[in-house]
Image (cartoon, helix red, strand yellow):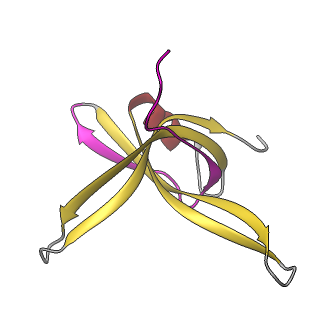
């Protein structure tokens, strides 16, 4: 049995329409943000919402489907892996980003 050591599963809503990026040689990438929310009761008995934002990217056929069928506010479930990368901005500052590379997307909610 294969054990996945870097596996992420999230259910949430798209924070923006998917952005299609052409990588050349007929390869594409799609990126979008995903909001996940948890609810809890604080010490005063008030219900609170804690929302986390995730950067999602996907490639190939999954990217084509995401770009065609997903839009802002759509509820989805994704599975993939966590990745980290860095780059230098135009001022020479190092920037970091954490992304989920989705290899599976399932549309939820009403059709």
Residue at the outermost bottom position: 44
Among the 4 quarters of the image, the one containing residue 63: top left
Query: Measuring 47% from the left and 25% from the top, which residue is drawn there?
Result: 3
Residue at the right extreme of this rendering: 45
Reply above or below: 110 against 91.
above
For residue 82, side relative to residue 92 (left or right) = right
Q: Residue at x 71, y 41 (%)?
A: 108
Between 105 and 36, the residue placed more toward the observer is: 36
Residue situated in front as seen by the camera: 47 or 71: 47
Residue 53 position, x and y percent, is 54, 63
Pick the front one: 85 or 31: 85
- The range drawn in magenta is 1-25
Q: Position of residue 77 (x, y in %)?
A: 63, 42
Residue 13 lies in the magenta stretch: yes
Q: Which residue occupies the extreme top position in the image? A: 1
Residue 49 x %, y %: 73, 71
* Left or right: 94 as drawn, with respect to 70: left
Relative vertical location of residue 19 with respect to residue 60 in this rendering, above or below: below
Number of marks drawn:
0
The residue under the point 64% across, 52% down is 12
Quadrant in which the C terminus appears = top right
Give the vertical position of 92 relative to 57 (above or below): below
């Amino acid at each position: 049995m294969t054990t996945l050591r870097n596996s992420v599963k999230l259910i949430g809503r798209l924070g923006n329409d998917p952005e299609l990026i052409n990588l050349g040689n007929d390869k594409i990438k799609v990126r979008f943000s995903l909001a996940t929310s948890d609810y809890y009761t604080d010490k005063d008995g008030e219900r609170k919402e804690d929302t986390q934002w995730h950067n999602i990217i996907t490639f190939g056929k999954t990217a084509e489907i995401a770009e065609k069928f997903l839009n802002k506010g759509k509820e989805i479930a994704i599975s993939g892996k966590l990745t980290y990368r860095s780059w230098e901005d135009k001022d020479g500052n190092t920037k970091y980003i954490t992304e989920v590379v989705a290899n599976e997307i399932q549309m939820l909610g009403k059709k």
